[in-house]
Amino acid sequence: MHRLSGPEPTPDARSEIRAGERFAFGNNWSHFLELLDDTRITEAVESLTAMLHVDHLHGQRFLDIGSGSGLFSVAARRLGAAVVSFDYDPSSVACTAELRRRHSREDDSWQVLEGSVLDRTLLATLGQFDIVYSWGVLHHTGDMWAALSNVVDMVQPGGWLFISIYNDQGGRSRAWLRIKRRYNAAGPVGRWVLLQAIDLAFRARSLGPMRSAYRRATRQSAPEGRARRRGMDRHYDLIDWVGGYPFEVAKPEQVFDFYRERGFVLERLKTCAGGIGCNEYVLRKL
């Protein structure tokens, strides 16, 4: 594992977490690693092949921006790609490094780095990639549109950009922003109470439409307690959803127009049907 360093220091994730300005994503992922098995990895592999419409990634360079647990880096490596993973949160970097140790200990085709997608100087050192993947990350940077812009040069001509961005629901999104701020400013007890309240609200039969929207947002397709289609887990996704801050959103047409103006074409789009959660985009660079 290496730490990327540039001429200008970036803010420290740990200090932002302590100040309540950032959710401890890496801490959440460290608990998720206890559940991560071959079944979940297989589901992650299948979700990649389905969205990218490929059978393998042999001979491809794959960049995992905001690698989190490292699950999709493992998936890309199993598909044959040479992988570079990086994350801003040191604990997330440690999670990804642990998965590399478990699954690719002696493998020189997978690098794990620490750095920020907002640091263009650092990104320039990585070169270009056949596939740039960043699922549910760029809206948590604190400057989403800069992050969306910075990934443009990471994709080589003819390459693919696979991202997911929180759907803009207007007033509801602003309400969720207030909840996320409250969660990160609270102590352990306050966070637990807020999390339980949101969980109960999602489960309540009287809020059936909201619950259905949440299930779409987290892509839960298996019974309670079992793995989901992307290999993730409902409990840790709920924590990520309630606590995930910074938090920004975008309408699908905004993302589409943004990348069309920068030489990309939209190949596939999976929306969350106007609800909470992420819209997924697969774009190809001309």
Image: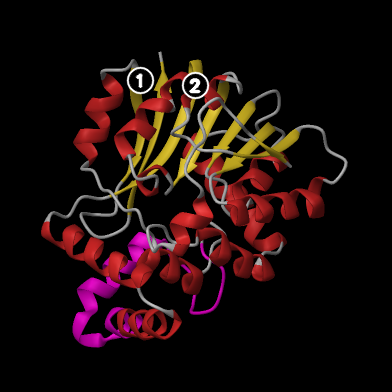
Image spot of residue 153 (x, y percent): 46, 19
Farthest-out residue, right:
106
- Depth check: 66 or 230 in front? 66
The residue under label 1 is which amino acid type? Phe
Magenta stretch holds residue 7: no
C-alpha distance separating marks 2 and 1: 10 Å
Image spot of residue 56 (x, y percent): 66, 34
Main SS class of the magenta portion in the image? helix
Magenta stretch holds residue 224: yes
The residue under label 2 is which amino acid type? Val
Query: Which quarter of the picture shows residue 183?
Result: bottom left
Image spot of residue 206 (x, y percent): 19, 86
Residue span colored magenta: 199-228
- According to the picture, the residue beneath numbered tag 1 turns out to be 264
Q: Residue at x 26, y 18 (%)?
A: 261
Farthest-out residue, left:
171
Query: Which quarter of the picture shows residue 38?
Result: bottom right
32 versus 208 height, above or below: above
Residue 155: assigned label? 2
Q: Residue at x 43, y 33 (%)?
A: 118
